[in-house]
Image: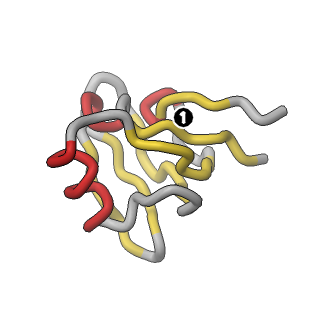
Amino acid sequence: MNRIVPLSSLMSGERGEVVEIVGGRGVIRRLYEMGLVPFSRVEVLISHMPGPMLVKVNGSRIAIGRGIAMKIMVRKLP
């Protein structure tokens, strides 16, 4: 099933593929600069509510706040 959810809903160890980023130009540009672009694969390394998430993208580890993670729509991967 190709379920599209916000990145913030993924738990530690889960992976997803970025589908789109919902936000203004500044947010989109900043995330693109970090490698979070459509079709990129993301693995959640640490996700403890309500704090920030640590994700792995293109071999880099990135800390993302929950508010921003809610704007990144991903397709959950098995």
Does residue 10 sit above or below 41 in this rendering? above
Does residue 38 sit above or below 71 in this rendering? below
Residue at the image position 44 percent from the left and 59 percent from the top:
37
Q: Residue furthest bottom?
A: 59
Q: Which residue is mark 1?
A: 10
Number of numbered tags placed on the structure image: 1
Towards the viewer: 27 or 68: 27
Towards the viewer: 33 or 43: 33
Residue at the image position 78 percent from the left and 47 percent from the top:
78
Q: Regarding mark 1 in the picture, which secondary structure is present there?
A: loop
Q: Residue 45: x percent and y percent?
A: 47, 52
The quarter of the rendered structure image containing the N terminus is top right
Q: Residue 48: x percent and y percent?
A: 37, 32
Q: Residue 75: x percent and y percent?
A: 65, 41
Residue at the image position 25 percent from the left and 29 percent from the top:
67
Does residue 52 sit above or below 38 in this rendering? above
Q: Is residue 26 left or right of residue 55?
A: left
Q: Residue 71: x percent and y percent?
A: 36, 33
Q: Amino acid at mark 1?
A: Leu
Residue at the image position 54 percent from the left and 62 percent from the top:
40
Q: How is the image coloured?
A: secondary structure
Q: Residue furthest left?
A: 26
Quarter of image, res 72: top left
Q: Residue furthest front?
A: 25
Towards the viewer: 12 or 78: 78
Does residue 27 sit above or below 55 in this rendering? above
Classed neighbour count for the residue bearing mark 1: other residues with Cα under 10 Å, few (<14), some (14–19), many (≥20): some
